[in-house]
């Protein structure tokens, strides 16, 4: 399949997604003390999401039963599906009563970032805010993020997030996906308002060099934060919310300005220095999402990422690096993706703990599990941001 064909398919998917708002009505759950794991019985009190065979209709887009081989995407095995289900169940049972998740690692709790990543992983399974086994969890996740949307557009819990732009970008990705499938008019307007304000905040806080740093008023930039914001902007644009092309072009130019002769991307435009494999893998995903499939810059960056990011060991940011590299290779498709997914899925299944979680990059189990599940569920293509 040629890059031109991929680009056409990507554009077509985005257009269809904007045109078709699908299935979702939110039921707002109670707000209780933060940080307390939710009791399983509470789902009954809130009203369970419709299951297959209920009068509300069949579950849409959820993972198939293990005995239905013909429904599996290429490369997905029964063992992978079992691993996915165990991971999804781990996230479902560890969500806090206020709808959040928090990191248990050494970098702080970062509830907005963790909640957005976990919610995205659950949505990758095909559950929506009204349908599927994780509908209630996703609704509560959305509620939590909306409650943490500030008047200036920043989505954060300031007391717990020293570098709020990471969580802001992840939240923008997740909420943009939710907005595209929300059918309750009042709720759709609410999500639209938060996403639009979040996009405006990103646009206002872009540095003169074209990037972003840890907080909106930092007036600086570095690669990993920049990539998170561009992904969020792309997700918003996919869902029909206006995004300035000037902002996107400046961000892509920023990535180009950070590229070294070896194809890798440096930490920032101002400091440059040696190429960073993890940031390079993330940059490729961003370039592909921006439609630059055939761009020599993207090709050089991908070649560098493939050389420096082995499946089994790519340094201290292993999960972060492969969270993005997997997206890029899936977009690209072909033999590279087939081999990568086979190798990565086997490695991830070996790393999964007895409780279904993954520990990722020292950040904690919520982060590691959300990243691993997103990678493993890419073949299902349930979210437009990850579709070809």
Image: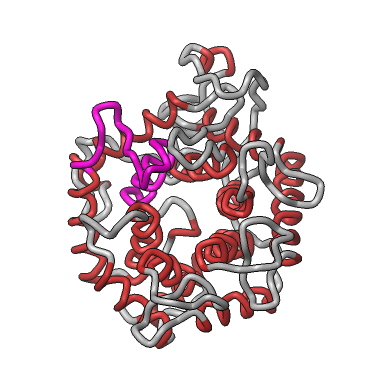
In the foreground, 148 or 345: 148
Q: Residue at x 42, y 84 (%)?
A: 297
In the foreground, 155 or 379: 155
Total marks in image: 0
The image quadrant that residue 241 belongs to is bottom right
Q: Name the quarter where the N terminus is drawn.
A: bottom left
Position of 300 relative to 51 (above/below): below
Q: Residue at x 56, y 24 (%)?
A: 35
Instruction: Look at the image and tell me whether residue 379 can be seen.
Output: no
User: Is 350 on the left-hand or right-hand side of 170?
Assistant: left
Q: Residue at x 75, y 52 (%)?
A: 153
Residue, far right: 151
In the image, residue 231 lies in the stretch drawn in magenta:
no
Position of 51 relative to 227 (above/below): above
Position of 91 relative to 342 (above/below): above
Q: Picture coordinates of residue 314 (x, y %)?
A: 27, 60
Q: Picture coordinates of residue 149 (x, y %)?
A: 72, 43
Q: How is the image coloured?
A: secondary structure
Instruction: Look at the image and tell me whether residue 211 can be seen.
Output: yes
Q: Which residues are magenta?
A: 349-377
Q: Picture coordinates of residue 381 (x, y %)?
A: 40, 55
User: Is 67 on the left-hand or right-hand side of 89?
Assistant: left
Q: Residue at x 44, y 59 (%)?
A: 386
Q: Picture coordinates of residue 282 (x, y %)?
A: 43, 65
Q: Name the quarter where the C terminus is drawn.
A: bottom left
In the image, residue 354 lies in the stretch drawn in magenta:
yes
User: Is 200 on the left-hand or right-hand side of 73?
Assistant: right
């Amino acid at each position: 399949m040629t890059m031109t064909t991929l680009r056409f398919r990507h554009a077509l998917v985005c257009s269809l997604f904007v045109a078709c708002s699908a299935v979702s009505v939110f039921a707002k759950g109670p707000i209780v003390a933060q940080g307390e794991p939710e009791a399983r019985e509470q789902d009954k009190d809130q009203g369970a999401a419709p299951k297959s065979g209920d009068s509300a209709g069949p579950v849409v887009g959820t993972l198939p039963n293990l005995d239905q081989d013909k429904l599996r995407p290429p490369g997905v095995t029964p063992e992978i599906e079992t691993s996915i289900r165990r991971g999804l169940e781990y996230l479902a049972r560890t969500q806090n009563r206020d709808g959040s998740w928090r990191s248990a690692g050494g970098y702080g709790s970062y509830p907005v970032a963790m909640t957005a990543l976990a919610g995205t992983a659950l949505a990758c399974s095909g559950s929506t805010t009204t349908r599927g086994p994780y509908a209630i969890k996703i609704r509560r996740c959305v509620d939590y993020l909306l409650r943490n949307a500030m008047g200036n557009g920043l989505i954060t819990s300031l007391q717990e997030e020293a570098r709020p732009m990471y969580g802001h970008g992840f939240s923008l990705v997740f909420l943009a996906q939710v907005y595209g499938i929300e059918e309750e008019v009042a709720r759709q307007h609410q999500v639209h308002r938060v996403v639009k304000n979040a996009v405006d905040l990103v646009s206002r806080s872009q540095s003169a060099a074209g990037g972003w740093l840890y907080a909106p008023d930092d007036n600086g930039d570095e690669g990993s934060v920049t990539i998170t914001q561009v992904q969020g902007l792309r997700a918003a644009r996919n869902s029909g919310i206006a995004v300035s092309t000037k902002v996107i072009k400046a961000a892509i130019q920023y990535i180009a300005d950070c590229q070294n002769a070896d194809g890798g991307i440096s930490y920032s435009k101002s400091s440059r220095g040696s190429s960073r494999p993890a940031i390079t893998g993330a940059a490729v995903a961003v370039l592909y999402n921006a439609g630059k499939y055939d761009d020599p810059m993207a090709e050089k960056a991908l070649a560098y990422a493939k050389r420096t990011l082995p499946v089994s060991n790519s340094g201290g940011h292993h999960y972060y690096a492969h969270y993005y590299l997997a997206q890029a290779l899936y977009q690209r498709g072909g033999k590279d993706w087939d081999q990568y997914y086979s190798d990565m899925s086997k490695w991830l299944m070996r790393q999964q703990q007895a409780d279904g979680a993954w520990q990722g990059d020292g950040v904690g189990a919520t982060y590691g599990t959300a990243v691993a599940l997103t990678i493993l569920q890419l073949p299902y293509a349930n979210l437009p941001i990850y579709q070809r």
